[in-house]
Structure formats: structure tokens, C-alpha cells
Image (spheres, rainbow, N blue to C red):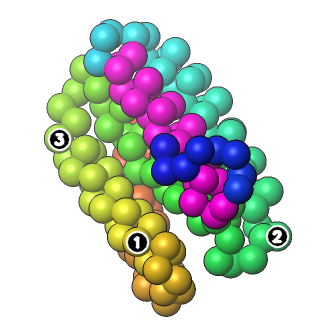
Amino acid sequence: MLGSGDGGDEVSELAGTFDQVTVGIRALMSAAMEGADPESVRVGFEALRDQWLAAERDSRDDEPGSIRRFEGVAAMLCGEAFWPAIRAVSEHRDAGEELDRAKEAARWILRAHTAFASGHQEALNLCLRRAANVVRDAEGERSPDA
């Protein structure tokens, strides 16, 4: 966590949606690696997705530079980026390509955080667009039954 969570400053507020999503991603990947039923992993992912989509939707009225807006978008992108890898692992398939894409999206999200923290809105927007493109490209390459 980046802050104490007491809401006293902008940085401490970052310990919300994004942290919850990353904890959820790790838990789902662990469950998949331990042999959890793929359907159970999918249901867990959908529940997590519902949470970040609600957070992102709730933040749409916030100022573009607000921490809540950044977190909502970053959490959504991160979750969507890691889902193909989690699914592949739960189905006992090689997840190398999916993990590479997820790591690439995560690198863009980390760069976006740096831009956000330093107040560079143009760089922030660019980094978030690049992360979104990685996710979108991966979705476009998946087969319809995936």
C-alpha cells in the first residue's frame, strides 16, 4: 500500500480499487495454479470484474486527474489484461503469450501511474491508451469460443 488509508492525502487514497483488483488477480492466479475448477475461477473473475467496472463507472463524474478516476481505469485495464493468462492456467494451457501481454499492459499502467503522480496529463493519457491497446489487441486475437 502506498499510504495509510486514512484519506488524509491523495497518495493514501490509492489503496482502494487498484489494490483490491491486484489482490484479486493474485488470488485467482493462485487458485488456477493450484488446480481450481476453471468454472469456479471464471465465476470469481466475473465477480471481481463487476467490482472494478462499478468503481470505474462511479468515477466517470470525477475530474479527469482525480485519483479515484485513475484507479478505476487502471484497475479495469489490469484486470482485463491478466484474465487471459489466469484462464489459460486454469485450463492447464501454456500461458506464456498471455502473461507477456499482461506484463506489457502492466508496464504501461505503471508508466501511467508515474505520469499521474507527476501531473503529466498528456503522458498519462498516452500510457493508458497504450495499455488499453494491448488489452484490445489481445481480445481481438482470441477465438470466439475462448
Q: Which residue is mark 2?
A: 61
Label 2 sits on a secondary structure element that is helix
Instruction: Give the left or right position of residue 135, taking residue 67 as reference.
Output: left
Q: Position of residue 15 (x, y in %)?
A: 58, 46
What is the spatial separation of the Cα atoms under label 1 and label 3, in whole angstroms? 27 Å
Give the residue displayed 52% in from the left and 83% down from the top.
119
Q: Which residue is mark 3?
A: 96
What is the spatial separation of the Cα atoms under label 2 and label 1, in whole angstroms? 23 Å
Label 3 sits on a secondary structure element that is helix
Give the residue displayed 32% in from the left and 50% down from the top.
102
Nearer-N-terminus badge (3/2): 2
Question: Quadrant where the C terminus lies?
Answer: top left
Q: Position of residue 40 (x, y in %)?
A: 52, 15
Q: Which residue is mark 1?
A: 114
Label 2, residues with CA under 10 Å away: few <14, some 14-19, many ≥20: few
Instruction: Give the left or right position of residue 50, taking residue 26 as reference.
Output: right
Residue 57 drawn above or below residue 5: below
Q: Position of residue 70 (x, y in %)?
A: 59, 65
Give the residue displayed 43% in from the left and 85% down from the top.
123
> Which residues fall within the magenta stretch?
9-32
Closest to the observer, 107 or 37 = 107
Nearer-N-terminus badge (1/3): 3
In contact (CB < 8 Å): disc 2 and disc 1? no
Residue 17 drawn in magenta: yes
Q: Nearer the viewer's eye, disc 2 or disc 1? A: 1
- Magenta stretch, main secondary structure, is helix
Task: Specify the amino acid type for callout 3.
Answer: Gly
Q: Picture quarter containing residue 44? A: top right
Task: Specify the amino acid type for callout 1.
Answer: Thr
